[in-house]
C-alpha cells in the first residue's frame, strides 16, 4: 500500500500514472488532463514532500521512482512532467514489465544532454545558482531559478503555502545531476514520447538527446510553457495517440 496521497480521476479505460514536477503538485500540474477521465483511469500522486503526502527533508528522485513503481499495479501508462519526468524514467527502468508507454515532458535529465551547447549552458547556470543563492530566501531562490530557465513568470509575494513547500523542496534538488538510465530504457519495448515547449534551449537539447537515445517520438509544441501539458487539448490529443498506439500493439502481441 503506497504512502502517497493521489488524485484519482476516472474508473474505466487505460490506466495512467501521472508524476508532477517541482513547482506544481498533482491537481495543479495535471488539471488539464482531468477531462481524459471519461476514457482513462488517471492516478496523479503527490510526490513525497508535497502535501497531503508525507513530508521529507530532501527530494530523492530514486526514492520517488520506487514509490511510483508501487502505484503502477499490474501495468500502467506512465507520464512525467519536469522532475516528474526524471522520476518516471527511473521508475520505468526499475519495472519495465509494468509500463505500457512512457511520456516525458521537459525532464531535467541534464547529464543526458551534456556535450550539447545549450544543455551545457543550462547545467552551468543551475549549478552556479545553487552555489550562490540563499536557500532560506525562498522568493529570491525561485525567482533566480526561473531566470536561469528563461521562464518569465511573476510569482505572488508572499508565496502561498503550497509554493513555499514546493520551493523548499526545490532547494534540496540537484537538477544538474539527475540523469536517467537511457541504455537500460533503450532496451525496453514500450513506446516512448518526449515532449518540449521550446522555451528553454537546454531542455530542447536534453529532449533531443533522450529521443535519439531511446528511439522515442519527439514532439515540440512551440511557444508552450515548461509544463507543456497545461496547453490542454493539443497535448491531450498527442498523449491519447500514444496510449492508443501502445494499447493496439499490446493487443496484437
Image (cartoon, rainbow, N blue to C red):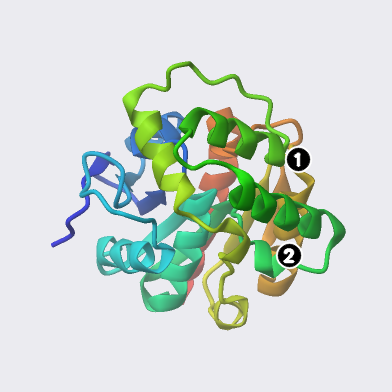
Estimate the x, y position of residue 215 in percent, counting from the top left.
69, 71
Q: Looking at the rendered structure, which numbered label has been put on residue 111?
A: none
- The image quadrant of residue 216 is bottom right
Q: Is residue 252 above or below residue 203?
A: below
The extreme right residue here reads 117
Whichever of labels 2 and 1 marks the residue nearer the N terminus, that label is 2
Left of 23 or right of it: where is 143? right
Left of 187 or right of it: where is 12? left
Residue 20 in view (yes/no): no
Numbered disc 1: secondary structure: loop
Which quadrant does the N terminus fall into?
A: bottom left
For the point 36% across and 53% down, the residue is: 17
Q: Which residue is mark 1?
A: 198
Q: Nearer the viewer, residue 43 or 121?
A: 121
Q: Residues within 10 Å of mark 2 (few under 14, many from 20)?
A: many
Q: CA distance from mark 2 to mark 1?
A: 15 Å
The extreme left residue here reads 1
Estimate the x, y position of residue 225 in percent, counting from the top left.
64, 32
Estimate the x, y position of residue 44 in percent, counting from the top left.
33, 45
Left of 233 or right of it: where is 167? left
Q: Residues within 10 Å of mark 1 (few under 14, many from 20)?
A: some
Estimate the x, y position of residue 155 in percent, counting from the top left.
53, 21
For the point 83% across and 63% down, the residue is: 116
- The image quadrant of residue 24 is top left
Q: Nearer the viewer, residue 107 or 248?
A: 107
Q: Is residue 207 above or below residue 185?
A: above
Q: Nearer the viewer, residue 73 or 130?
A: 130
Q: Looking at the rendered structure, which numbered label has been put on residue 113?
A: 2
Numbered disc 2: secondary structure: helix
For the point 51% across and 46% down, the residue is: 240
Amino acid at each position: 500500500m503506497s504512502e502517497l496521497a493521489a488524485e484519482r480521476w476516472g474508473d474505466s479505460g487505460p490506466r495512467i500514472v501521472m508524476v508532477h514536477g517541482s513547482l506544481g503538485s498533482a491537481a495543479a500540474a495535471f488539471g488539464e488532463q482531468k477531462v481524459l477521465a471519461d476514457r482513462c483511469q488517471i492516478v496523479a500522486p503527490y510526490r513525497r514532500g508535497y502535501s497531503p503526502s508525507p513530508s521529507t527533508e530532501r527530494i530523492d528522485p530514486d526514492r520517488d521512482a520506487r514509490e511510483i513503481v508501487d502505484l503502477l499495479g499490474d501495468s500502467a501508462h506512465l507520464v512525467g512532467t519536469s522532475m516528474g519526468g526524471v522520476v518516471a524514467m527511473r521508475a520505468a527502468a526499475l519495472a519495465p514489465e509494468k509500463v505500457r508507454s512512457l511520456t516525458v515532458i521537459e525532464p531535467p535529465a541534464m547529464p543526458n544532454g551534456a556535450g550539447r551547447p545549450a544543455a551545457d549552458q543550462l547545467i552551468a547556470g543551475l549549478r552556479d545558482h545553487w552555489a550562490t543563492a540563499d536557500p532560506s530566501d525562498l522568493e529570491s531562490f525561485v525567482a533566480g531559478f526561473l531566470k536561469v530557465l528563461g521562464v518569465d513568470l511573476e510569482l505572488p509575494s508572499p508565496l502561498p503555502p503550497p509554493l513555499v513547500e514546493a520551493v523548499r523542496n526545490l532547494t534540496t534538488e540537484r537538477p544538474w545531476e539527475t540523469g536517467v538510465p537511457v541504455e537500460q530504457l533503450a532496451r525496453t519495448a514500450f513506446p516512448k514520447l518526449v515532449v518540449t515547449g521550446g522555451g528553454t534551449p537546454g531542455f530542447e537539447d536534453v529532449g533531443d538527446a533522450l529521443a535519439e537515445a531511446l528511439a522515442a517520438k519527439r514532439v515540440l509544441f512551440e511557444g508552450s510553457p515548461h509544463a507543456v501539458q497545461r496547453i490542454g487539448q493539443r497535448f491531450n490529443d498527442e498523449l491519447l495517440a500514444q496510449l492508443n498506439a501502445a494499447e493496439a500493439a499490446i493487443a496484437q502481441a
